[in-house]
Image (cartoon, helix red, strand yellow):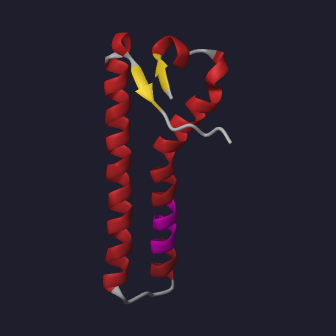
Amino acid sequence: MTLKFDEIISPHNTKEISALFHEIAQPLMVSSTYVTACINLLKNNCTDSNYLLSVMEKINDNIHITGEKFHALRDIILNMENLSISLPSYDK
């Protein structure tokens, strides 16, 4: 599905807008889950530093993914007059 800017701001496409925001928010939610896991591990005196490091690396990866998505969204906004984006179709 390809959308032009005037179609994106249309009230008839809230499903597509919701999908776009989900794609941006999802890595933040995953990171939050990993942070909670680290907190719980530390509270329970986890001494496996390799395990904690692997969880923290996952957090870092998800934060970078979020940053990339925000940069892509910024680029879209900066080029609104030429805006045309493709979104996956969620119709079943």
Question: Is 70 or 3 nearer to us in this picture?
Answer: 3
Going 31% across and 35% down the picture, which residue do you hit? 71
Q: In the rendered structure, does residue 33 fall within the stretch colored magenta?
A: yes
Going 45% across and 80% down the picture, which residue do you hit? 42
Report whether 26 appears left or right of 65.
Answer: right
* Residue 26 pos. (x, y %): 50, 50
Relative to 90, say whether 8 is above or below: above
* Residue 72 pos. (x, y %): 33, 33
Q: Main secondary structure of the magenta part?
A: helix
Q: In the rendered structure, does residue 42 fall within the stretch colored magenta?
A: no
Relative to 33, say whether 22 is above or below: above
Report whether 54 appears left or right of 39.
Answer: left
Relative to 33, say whether 1 is above or below: above
Going 31% across and 83% down the picture, which residue do you hit? 50
Q: Which residues are magenta?
A: 32-38
* Residue 73 pos. (x, y %): 38, 30
Going 51% across and 38% down the picture, which residue do you hit? 88
Q: Quadrant of the C terminus?
A: top right
Question: Is 73 or 90 nearer to us in this picture?
Answer: 90
Identify the image quadrant of residue 38: bottom left
Identify the image quadrant of residue 16: top right
* Residue 20 pos. (x, y %): 51, 35
Question: Is 54 or 38 nearer to us in this picture?
Answer: 54
Relative to 42, say whether 85 is above or below: above
